Image (spheres, helix red, strand yellow):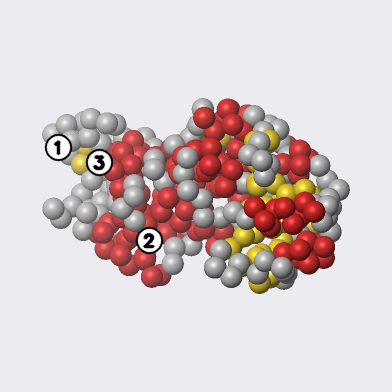
Amino acid sequence: MKSILEAIKRAGGHPLFVGGCVRDKILGTPSKDIDIEVYKIQADELIQVLSRFGKVNAVGASFGVIKLTTPNGEDFDFSLPRRYNKTGKGHKGFQVEVDPTMTPEVAASRRDFTWNSLAEAPDGKILAFFGGVDDLRNKVIRHTSPAFSEDPLRVLRGFQFAGRFNMTGAPETLELCLELSGEFSTLAIERVWGEFEKWASKSVKPSAGLRFLKDSGWLAHFPELEALVGCPQDPVWHPEGDVWQHTCQVVDQAAGKGIVVVLAALCHDMGKPGTTVKNSEGRWVSPGHNNPAAAQSFLARIGWPASIAGQVLELVENHMVH
């Protein structure tokens, strides 16, 4: 990598590591995706430099994205700074224009959260234009700039990041997420599932992601989850409180055990809101709550793939069988 960066600099470019690889380095966790943003150089010049180090995929060059695969199988993503002009609602309503003259600070302001706007120079210097290092260490999810509101998918990114890194949303960011709630319908269901998949497969504290959804007002888009809030349980068996609190505890116990187990933990008591009543002794009971109908409705809502749906629903239906 060092020789590639040196060659880019000799060609007049200014390379910076950006995004998740910088965040993960500060957290001390390995990162598979290495993203390098290159300033002060045109796309064709960058392609010419990179071609000396391996196979170049320039299919996305018009959008400022170039991929390099080295002879030893390493993959690197290079990008040029881009300007985004909002042309419509939703995640795809943008016109993209490559601008190599843009400053790193202006480019960083387009990123979603402060710790994703971090950059690292080849000499190891961290460029933190928006306080990302402090927010990362304090486990705070804070939007980088008002540009956050141009893409509603960023709310669901906040949801899965909260679970992955056990974070909480900054009040001003949660307020902005609530304002974006009306654009949920513009998101393709494949993108919704993409964020839930990351939450289920990578979270260390899944309940933190669920609380982010609730605090941001986006729980309303998932009525099967929202119905858990306030649904009572027998305090003898469930001293932790309502079904929402119980589910938050269960998903945390399931963390790291695979997508199927985490989703089953999330869905296992979705039948309770429709079945919970007081019995003749005045105690809360939920007969037949293992019916997976509500879970099936939820999984369809988030775009679950059929390959895992059957496994999740079978666990939900049999979760009372010890």
Q: Secondary structure at mark 2?
A: helix
* Between discs 1 and 2, the one toward the N terminus: 1
Q: Residues within 10 Å of mark 2 (few under 14, many from 20)?
A: some
Q: Position of residue 147 (x, y in %)?
A: 73, 41
Q: Which residue is mark 2?
A: 296
Q: Quarter of the image containing the N terminus?
A: bottom right
Secondary element type, mark 1 = loop
Q: Residue furthest right?
A: 101
Amino acid type of the residue that numbered disc 1 sits on in the rendered structure: Ser
Image coordinates for residue 126, horizontal then vertical, percent: 65, 36
Q: Are marks 3 and 2 in contact (CB under 8 Å)?
A: no
- The alpha-carbon separation of the residues under discs 3 and 2 comes to 22 Å
Residue 251 place in picture, x, y as percent: 33, 45
Tell me where residue 133 appears, x and y as whole percent: 59, 31
The kind of residue on which mark 3 rests is: Val
Q: Which residue does the numbered mark 1 point to in the structure image?
A: 280
Lateral position of residue 154 relative to residue 138, left or right:
right
Task: Check disc 3 and report the residue beneath it.
Answer: 277
Secondary structure under tag 3 reads strand
Above or below: residue 47 compared with residue 246: below
Q: Residues within 10 Å of mark 1 (few under 14, many from 20)?
A: few
